[in-house]
Amino acid sequence: MNGSLRISESEWEVMNLVWRESPATAAGIVAELSERKGWHVRTIRTLIDRLVRKGALKIKEDGRRYLYYPGIRREVCVRQASQTFMARVFEGAPASLVLNLVRKTPLDKKEIAELRRILDAKEDE
């Protein structure tokens, strides 16, 4: 899979489920998302089909059912979505994004220590 992959908010729900429970069946995806989100079966199947067309999901036939696997790693999608968000909202300035998140997010001592460690390592680069 090459290039950028745009995944909608609803498609993220499907992808998160498949990343967590790969391989996933269509019935399993439908059952969870219809219960958790209240979505109609046809809506969920449309999302699955879209993700297959985009290459985000891969299909393997298993008897009378289909198994769905991630066609792209979660880390790749997160990186692409983060870069798109940063470009759109923070004019491509990663420091502005990070500063905003740190200022507005409650952090525990362990998270603060990890941030300090990362920043100290950045100073040494």
Image (cartoon, grey):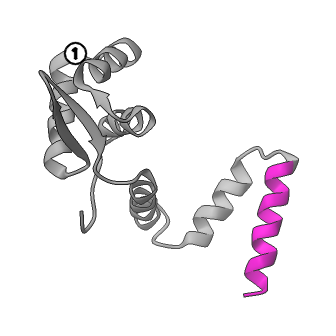
Whether the magenta-drawn stretch holds residue 122 is answered as yes
Task: Give the side of residue 91 with respect to residue 71, left or right.
Answer: right
Task: Give the side of residue 24 with respect to residue 103, left or right.
Answer: left
Q: Farthest residue toward the front?
A: 63
Residue position for label 1:
40
Q: Please tell me which residue is depicted at 45% across the width and 70% down the height of the picture.
A: 91
Residue kind at label 1, given as amino acid type: His
Task: Give the side of residue 37 with respect to residue 112, left or right.
Answer: left
Q: Please tell me which residue is depicted at 27% across the width and 54% down the height of the picture.
A: 6
Q: Position of residue 73 (x, y in %)?
A: 39, 54
Q: Nearer the viewer, residue 116 or 31?
A: 31
Whether the magenta-drawn stretch holds residue 72 is answered as no
Task: Give the side of residue 100 with respect to residue 84, left or right.
Answer: right
Looking at the image, residue 83 lies above or below residue 106: below
Mark 1 burial class by Cα count in 10 Å: few <14, some 14-19, many 20+: few
Q: Which residues are magenta?
A: 110-125
> Helix, strand, or loop for circle 1?
loop
